């Protein structure tokens, strides 16, 4: 089902708002991960405001959808969205990465309402997500589990062990989205560990593969709907994105994986982001 024009416009407006709010927040606290947060803005926004069955008033509902942020360093964008959805007060955002804050640098399920799994060590998200998907089957529930992963995360061996298992168990209630921005902590994927044809790898492991533009909310929405129709195998969406999307000097730069935002950089970023509203 195609995304209605008004829904598409609303999602794009929210993405623009979240990008601005993210830069303001990370500049204010002088810590955090802007690059991967910006690349995942459309993916997270489309999921939470259009696709996921989650309710801040019933955060532990047994049949809620499960979302796992495998690339835990994108927590700032996830927190923005959870606050907007009402899982915790927006005033809490300024405590990000501060001592005794419930908003840790990577998501913590023990402290933060709306977070399903504590993540940080890359690769564990898919294994745990598969467990959640299998639990739904055992419990006779119809919730979906969606795992958002980074492409650098795919270099972890545990990912492919989980991928094999998901195909073996025909986990068609499990969806992986790969934030394929081509850049990781210390450089590009090509420099650090070339991944070759990522889509071909997933197909070889028995997954249904969908390729999209990860900054097009309509393509994200359509792909998530398409994944629901695939039976007998798990689905992965390869979302082509740009690290630091929306801020010219951050785009495609590994230095902005995690770096304090100076006053000059903040002013330039905000000037560029204001154009998107």
Image (spheres, helix red, strand yellow):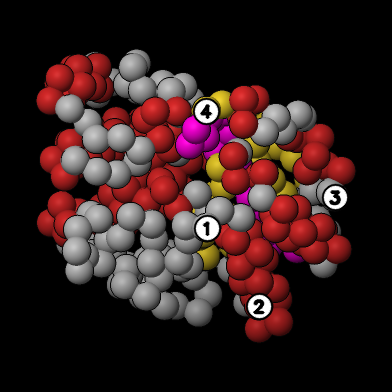
Q: Which of the marked residues, 3 or 4, is nearer the chain's N terminus?
A: 4
Kindly indicate whether the residue at mark 4 contacts the one at mark 2 (C-beta within 8 angstroms): no
In the drawing, what numbered circle is on residue 187?
4
Kindly indicate whether the residue at mark 1 contacts the one at mark 3 (C-beta within 8 angstroms): no
Question: What is the count of numbered marks?
Answer: 4
Residue 7 in view = no
Numbered disc 2: secondary structure: helix
Q: How far apart are marks 3 and 2 (CA)?
A: 21 Å
* Residue occupying image coordinates x 50% and y 49%: 71
Q: Which of the marked residues, 2 or 1, is nearer the chain's N terminus?
A: 1
Q: Distance between the residues labelled 3 and 4?
A: 30 Å
147 is higher (above) or lower (below) than 116: above
Q: Mark 3 points at which residue?
A: 206
Q: Mark 2 points at which residue?
A: 135
* Residue occupying image coordinates x 43% and y 23%: 253
Q: How far apart are marks 3 and 1 (CA)?
A: 25 Å
Numbered disc 1: secondary structure: loop
- Quarter where residue 255 is shown: top left
């Amino acid at each position: 089902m195609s995304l209605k024009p008004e829904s598409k416009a609303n999602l794009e407006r929210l993405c623009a708002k979240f990008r601005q709010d993210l830069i303001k927040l990370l500049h204010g606290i002088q810590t955090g991960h802007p690059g991967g947060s910006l690349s995942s803005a459309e993916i997270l926004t489309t999921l939470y405001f259009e696709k996921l069955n989650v309710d801040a008033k019933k955060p532990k509902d047994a049949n809620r959808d499960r979302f796992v942020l495998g690339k835990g360093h994108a927590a700032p964008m996830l927190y923005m969205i959870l606050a907007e959805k009402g899982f915790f007060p927006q005033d809490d955002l300024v405590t990000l990465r501060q001592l005794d804050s419930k908003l840790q640098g990577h998501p913590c399920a023990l402290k933060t309402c709306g977070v399903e799994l504590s993540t940080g060590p890359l690769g564990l998200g898919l294994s745990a997500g598969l467990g959640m998907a299998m639990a739904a089957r055992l419990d006779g529930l119809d919730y979906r589990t969606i795992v958002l992963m980074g492409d650098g995360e795919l270099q972890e061996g545990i990912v492919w062990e989980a991928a094999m298992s998901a195909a073996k168990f025909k986990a068609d209630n499990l969806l992986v989205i790969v934030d394929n921005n081509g850049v990781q902590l210390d450089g590009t994927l090509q420099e650090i560990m070339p991944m070759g044809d990522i889509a071909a790898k997933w197909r070889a492991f028995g997954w249904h593969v969908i390729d999209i533009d990860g900054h097009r909310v309509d393509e994200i929405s359509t792909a998530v709907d398409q994944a629901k129709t695939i039976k007998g195998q798990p689905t992965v969406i390869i979302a082509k994105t740009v690290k630091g999307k929306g801020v010219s000097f951050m785009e495609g730069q590994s230095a902005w994986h995690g770096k304090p935002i100076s006053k000059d950089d903040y002013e330039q970023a905000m000037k560029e982001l204001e154009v998107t509203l």
